[in-house]
Image (cartoon, rainbow, N blue to C red):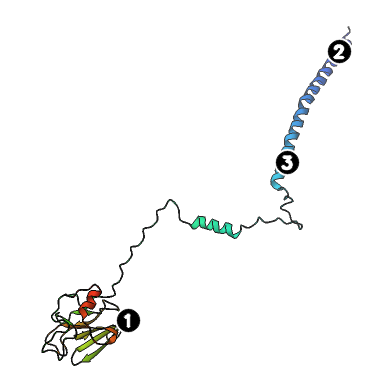
Amino acid sequence: MTINSRTDARAQQRRLARRGTRTAVLTVALPSAATLGVFTAAAAAVQHDHTHPSAPSAADARPDGARTAPPSPGPAAVAAARADRTGPRGDLPEPPGLPTPPERPHYLLPVAARGLSAVFGQAGTHWSVRHTGIDFPVPSGTPVRAATDGTVTTRWSSAYGYLAVVTDRDGTSTWYGHLRSFRVRKGQVRAGDVIAYSGSSGNSTGPHLHFEVRPDGGAPVDPLPWLLAHGLDPR
């Protein structure tokens, strides 16, 4: 073989080697490009989903193309939700009830001290007729209370001195005589209200309270049975 023949053979081998290398590179590169294309398409789809929300469904769409607002809850649902928020919680104890105040008495003794110095119908030189009430021997200035609810009026009497009269709704009048002064001269009072102070005014021999009961504003009756009938004992 001549020198030129050997040179041509080597050149041919180099060309074949370069051709094989290009084929191998293309064989590896082509699948990689295809794979990159798949990833690129997927990324573009995701980006499209984020930037372009899906179109409304036929049920949500209106003929004019506007979205339909979700339906509002009905009155029953609103009331039930409010009851759930404001109703009592089962895990909290109920507050204790307030004690019932005692019932106010409607009849009371006219003075706090018990004991009588004169009774109804008693005869004596101090009275032109028999005694028309009962006497409580209390010091001057003792608070005198209304024995019933009613309307109070006051006046001066030569026999009773300073006199207070309380007329109940049923017409019964209670009289309080020989007073030193008045605390309530007229108006509405309740049983137990202080209306005056005891004394010895009028036809009196010493400080005491003269007490009478007159049903329907008529003649006086014995106050003792009347007081006892209302659960009060002045003796």
Amino acid type at mark 3: Ala
| Gap between marks 1 and 2 measured at Cα | 151 Å
Q: Which residue is mark 1?
A: 170
In this rendering, the label closer to the viewer, 3 or 1: 1
Which residue is at 61% across, 58% downward? Answer: 74
In which quadrant will I find the N terminus? top right
Q: Secondary structure at mark 3?
A: helix
Please tell me which of labels 3 and 1 falls first in the chain. 3
Residue 152 x %, y %: 28, 84
Examine the rendered structure and indicate whether residue 94 appears above or below residue 225.
above
Query: Residue 217 falls in which quadrant of the image?
Result: bottom left
Image location (x, y in percent) of residue 166 = 27, 83
Determine which residue is flagged by label 3. 45
Residue located at (21% from left, 92% from top)? 157
In depth, the one of 66 and 167 nearer the eye is 167
Residue 94 shows in this picture: yes
Q: Amino acid at mark 1?
A: Asp
Left or right: 185 in relation to 122: right
